Amino acid sequence: MSGRALSQPGSVARESATTDRLAPEAHVAPVPAKQRSNTRRLKAWISGAIVLLLVAAGYYAWQQLKPAGLPAGIAAGNGRLEAIEIDIAAKIAGRINNILVDEGDFVSVGQVLARMDTATLDAQKREAEAQLQRATIAVQTAQRSGDAA
């Protein structure tokens, strides 16, 4: 039945020259302008809602993933810090056995900062005490031999 169109059920088929030449889409009724305008508005609202949803999701992710603030006792700021550097020295040269403070710690006057290794000094002290004892014995011996004569 190509080339024929039926106007109503039960009516006689008649030949139509225009139906053979037109594309199948031509048979679709055109959409009214008002309905096209409503469709465009709906698409614009949906697009806007999607953009708004993406912005909200991005903000939420940014809030959740941003690094935590500074810990208690730590301050942040801009500016210039000036520090005073103080050199310390021991009265006697030697090796350090134990350091009691860390770099950057606040210290007060008279505070012990380090302990020296005194093994060498202790050995020298014992040697000096032994020499003193020998000298004392020598003096006592000399005095006794002078008294006996």
Image (cartoon, helix red, strand yellow):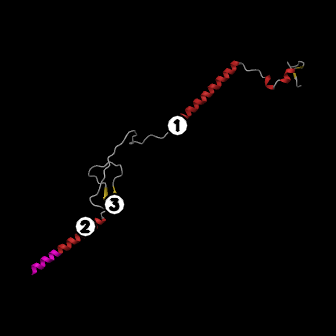
Q: Upstream in the sequence, badge 1 or badge 2?
A: 1
Q: Is residue 66 above or below residue 127?
A: above
In the image, what residue occupies the spot 28% across and 66% down?
A: 122
> Looking at numbered disc 1 in the image, what kind of residue is underneath it?
Trp
Which residue, given by chain and number where applicable, does mark 2 sit on? Answer: 125
Left or right: where 32 falls relative to 85? right
Can you give x and y, in whole percent of width and height, for residue 65 in the image?
Answer: 51, 39
Can you give x and y, in whole percent of width and height, for residue 107 in the image?
Answer: 30, 49
Relative depth, front residue between 118 and 91: 91
Specify the quadrant of the image occupied by residue 142: bottom left
Callouts 1 and 2 close, C-beta under 8 Å: no
- Calculate the distance from the C-alpha at mark 1 to the C-alpha at mark 3: 51 Å
Q: Is residue 133 above or below residue 60?
A: below
> Looking at numbered disc 3 in the image, what kind of residue is underneath it?
Asn
Disc on res. 19: none
Q: Upstream in the sequence, badge 2 or badge 3?
A: 3
Q: Upstream in the sequence, badge 1 or badge 3?
A: 1
Specify the quadrant of the image occupied by residue 10: top right
Left or right: where 61 falls relative to 73? right
What is the span of residues highlighted in magenta in the rendered image?
A: 138-149
142 magenta-colored: yes
Relative depth, front residue between 94 and 80: 80
> Looking at numbered disc 2 in the image, what kind of residue is underneath it?
Lys
- Calculate the distance from the C-alpha at mark 2 to the C-alpha at mark 3: 18 Å
Can you give x and y, in whole percent of width and height, for residue 45 in the image?
Answer: 62, 25
Q: Residues within 10 Å of mark 1 (few under 14, many from 20)?
A: few
Disc on res. 62: 1
Callouts 2 and 3 close, C-beta under 8 Å: no
Quadrant of the frame with the C terminus: bottom left
In the image, what residue occupies the spot 81% across and 26% down?
A: 24
